Amino acid sequence: MDINKAIRTAVDTGNVILGSRESIKSIKHGEGKLVIIAENCKEDIMEDVKYYAKLSNIPVYIHNVNSLELGAICGKPFPVSVMVILDPGNSDILNMVKS
């Protein structure tokens, strides 16, 4: 299973948060098992996400796609620059990115 399929499976079968504002909120509360960031995410947002994720001990994965492609992978008609995986569902994404 490749990373894009794993992301889509997590969106379809698990519980995820899409968008930088909501993602940062959940990371500040220590919610989430993995943060995925698009490579073209704004620098200030990326720094905030990394900082709060480090404080909350949540791993961060910078995916090599832009926000439009990440949105399409998630099945959404809009760009997604940051997403948080709360529950991976049937996806094995947590094992894929930690290894």
Image: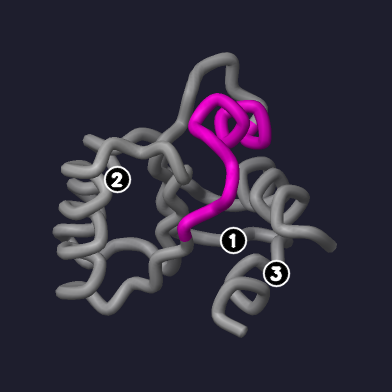
Mark before the other along the chain sequence, 3 or 2: 2
- Residue found 16% across the figure and 64% down from its top: 51
**Residue 50 in the image: x percent, y percent?**
25, 62
Q: Which residues are magenta?
A: 62-74
- Residue found 71% across the figure and 49% down from its top: 4
- Residue found 29% across the figure and 45% down from its top: 23
Q: Is residue 99 above or below residue 34?
A: below
Question: For the residue marked with disc 3, what is the amino acid?
Answer: Asp
Look at the image and say whether residue 37 sits in the magenta stretch: no
Question: CA gap, disc 3 to disc 2?
Answer: 21 Å
Q: In what element is the residue under mark 1?
A: loop
Question: For the residue marked with disc 2, what is the amino acid?
Answer: Ser
Question: For the residue marked with disc 1, what is the amino acid?
Answer: Pro
Residue that mark 3 sits on: 92
**Residue 23, numbered circle:** 2
Q: Is residue 29 above or below residue 12?
A: below
Q: Look at discs 2 and 1 and give the one toward the viewer.
A: 2
Look at the image and say whether residue 72 sits in the magenta stretch: yes
Q: Residues within 10 Å of mark 1 (few under 14, many from 20)?
A: many
Q: Are marks 3 and 1 in contact (CB under 8 Å)?
A: yes
Residue that extends furthest to the bottom in the rendered view of this protein: 99
Mark before the other along the chain sequence, 2 or 1: 2
Question: CA gap, disc 2 to disc 1?
Answer: 15 Å
Residue 96 is left or right of residue 56, and the answer is right
**Residue 93 in the image: x percent, y percent?**
64, 66
**Residue 77 in the image: x percent, y percent?**
58, 15
Residue 76 is left or right of residue 30, and the answer is right
**Residue 58, numbered circle:** none
Q: In what element is the residue under mark 3?
A: loop
Residue 14 is left or right of residue 1, and the answer is left
Q: In what element is the residue under mark 2?
A: helix
**Residue 88, numbered circle:** 1
